[in-house]
Image: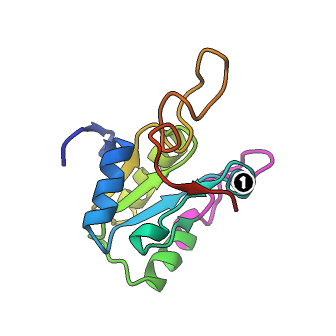
Amino acid sequence: MAEKEQLAGVDDVAVKLTWESLKKDPDSLLIDVRTQAEWAFVGVPDLSSLGKTLVCVEWQHFPGGQLNPSFASQLESELAAVAAGNDTELFFICRSGGRSLHSAQAMTAAGYRACHNVAGGFEGPFDSEAHRGLVAGWKAAGLPWVQR
């Protein structure tokens, strides 16, 4: 896989390379670890053109930002429901790449061997006007997304 960097045992993969990987590998999955509020008000990646469904499990709860103590077990249930195995390519995405890195590391520790962090996340960093979604990330790359 090109255009990736190793971060604490988890690959950091560019958003466009993530899209291409999801397109090429029918078993690969995109896992959105943002909060329900973010899914509802900011939008989510749209994988319908790939014939895929986005997997959504909160890494942290809103409000308050407490870690979801059931994250790994909830995600394992979601993965089992779609027959994903320990070698399935799993791409983790959040707003800008922090929570997704931690969640990918947690699932690597749980025995999943192909966990990747989506670099830049869904919205990327702030631009010079303190707006997200324009500099880097899924939205800035022009990849498909929808409001829920």
Q: Is residue 64 above or below residue 23?
A: above
Query: Residue 142 location in percent, x, y?
Result: 47, 44
Q: Which residues are magenta?
A: 57-73
Image-quadrant location for residue 99 = top right
Instruction: Say what amino acid the circle numbered 1 marks.
Output: His
Query: Residue 140 location in percent, x, y?
Result: 50, 37
Q: Residue at x 65, y 53 (%)?
A: 43
> Does residue 69 appear left or right of residue 10 in this picture?
right
Q: Is residue 77 above or below residue 38?
A: below
Q: Is residue 3 above or below residue 49?
A: above
Query: Residue 72 location in percent, x, y?
Result: 52, 66
Q: Is residue 120 above or below residue 19?
A: above
Nearest the viewer among 63 and 128 is 128
What residue did someone put label 1 on?
61
Q: Residue at x 73, y 57 (%)?
A: 40
Q: Residues within 10 Å of mark 1 (few under 14, many from 20)?
A: some
> Does residue 79 appear left or right of residue 56 in this picture?
left
Magenta stretch, main secondary structure, is loop
